[in-house]
Amino acid sequence: MNQNDVPVIVIKDLSFSYDGHPVLEDVNLSIPKGDFVSVVGPNGGGKTTLLKLILGLLRPSRGQVQVFGVTPEEARSRIGYMPQHSQLDPQFPATVLDVALMGRLGHGRPFGRYSRKDKEIVWRALEQVGLHDLRKKAFSSISGGQRQRLFIARALACEPDLLLLDEPTANLDMVMEGDLYELLHTLNQWLTVVMVSHDLGFVSRVVKNVICVKRKVLMHATSEITGEIINEIYGSPMRMVRHNGEGSCNCFSS
Amino acid sequence: MLQFLTDLQHYTFLQNALLTGILASVACGIIGTYIVVRRISYIADGIAHTVLGGMGAALYLHKVYHWHGILPIHGALVSAIIAAIIIGLVSLRAKQREDTVISALWAVGMAVGIVFIARTPGYSEDLMGYLFGNILMVSSNDLWMLAGLDALIVALGLLFYNQFVAVCFDQEFARLRGINVEAFYLLLLGLAALTVVVLATVVGIVMVIALLTLPVGIAALYSSAVWRMMAISTILCAVFTTSGLALSYGPDYPAGATTIIIAGAAYLCTTTFKWALSRGRS
């Protein structure tokens, strides 16, 4: 089988429960190489849990997860991960460059300083997200939007083949959100992207597939998403705005 | 002050005291920074107070049962290791109970120490000595022990700097980059416990807590990198211990308590100044 034909993520008959409460049940998924997937669903529906199972930070109660055909632990060096930024200490004494360099850990020597090559890779990652000029700024002094981009740069510094992002658009205004999608769209040319989204503000031009998580997991092509599906996921009437490539938008309300 | 400078040239005990302050600054600057940025300074405080129990028990065995091989530092070491293991396991496995466990160890450790000290005959040993130490009575053995501690901390702290910083900043991401997060966290707790043990027997429990947190607290206001925070807090720590010693010497104030008051006043002034400055700007 050709390397390109192996799906990036395969999940088989997976269930996960936390303290006896089922969080995810009977999940079957296959995400092909080069896909751009948005993971949506209500709060507490299991979106972040699904991401952590793919990363191997949580172990499934039943079933299995394969990333690049191996276990998540074995695949970790090929995964770039951007966590929800709200968990981290905003006052931590580090520069933008310091934080991005953390993405190079585990690549070179087990101890000592970062190599010249590490610095070159981080340099490029910061350029890609447009933070290169701010590299000497303190982490505590940059804005929320810049912080999101910095965590993407840190994930890119891992030189990943798969990018996992947990709510990259949280706390961003419309303009910044647009810029971020533009960046992810560019990265998607050579990376597989899976992102958790806090709302349904996904852009169909960028996102190819949508995974709906509410204990059960369903995958839809972006073009198939309708108001009924949204209703089913969230269990309450909800308005969806879909942007088409031409800039027009279709609004469904129910 | 002048008296201090002339006596410094003649008396070994003063030279030792000065050197103790400077050597303590290196350990406190590096370990203090790691525990403050990892937000676990309360863990070091908990271990420091638990140590009193071990020191009291060792003293009791030494005096009452004439176990002459047992010194307070041995008791401190045993109790610090027990406290660090309990706190470490609780914080890795059952995060929500951490503060209760630390409070319990803190209170019980001190109570045990006080009972043992009270039941130990002779008035040469008193509680104040253990809490505030006496920097003027440091032996050359103590100095070597401090120098050894510094060498260990500097070597590990520099060699695994990137790993420690990554674990302190974002534990989950560090784990994904293949770093053994538990091992580094326990190593950090172990080094903090060791620093507390060595310094508690040399300069006293309260002094350790002050030196581990106050200089770092000031340095944090002016640092955008962990290594810079270490350097600034080490220098500040040396300034505080030296000035504490110099200012307390003439009027014969307790040196440890004077140092802590100077450090505390400096911390209060700098944070207030910073706060006023940021308010003035906005």
Image: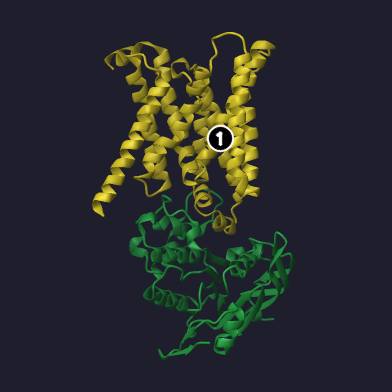
Chain colours: A green, B yellow
Could you tell me which residue is drawn at 27 percent across and 15 percent down?
B2
Name the residue furthest left: B280
Q: Residue at x 36, y 36 (%)?
A: B267
Name the one closer to the observer, B163 or B256: B256
Query: Mark 1 packing: few (<14 Cα in 10 Å), some, or many (20+)?
Result: many
Residue A67 in percent (x, y) is at: 65, 70
**Residue named by callout 1:** B46
A35 or A244, which is in the foreground? A244
Q: Is residue A194 above or below residue A109?
A: below
The structure residue drawn at horizontal position 51% and vertical position 27%, both measured from the top left corner, is B205
**Which quadrant holds the N terminus of chain A?**
bottom right
Q: Amino acid at mark 1?
A: Gly
**The one of A112 and A17 positioned closer to us in this rendering:** A17
Q: Is residue A206 above or below residue A48?
A: below
Q: Count the labels in the image.
A: 1
Residue at 36 percent across and 46 percent down: it is B223
Relative image position of residue B20 (x, y in whole percent): 44, 23
Q: Residue B271: give x, y in percent of width and height.
A: 33, 41
For disc 1, the chain is: B
Q: Is residue B176 above or below residue B251?
A: below
Q: Locate residue A142 relative to residue A201 in the image: left or right.
A: left
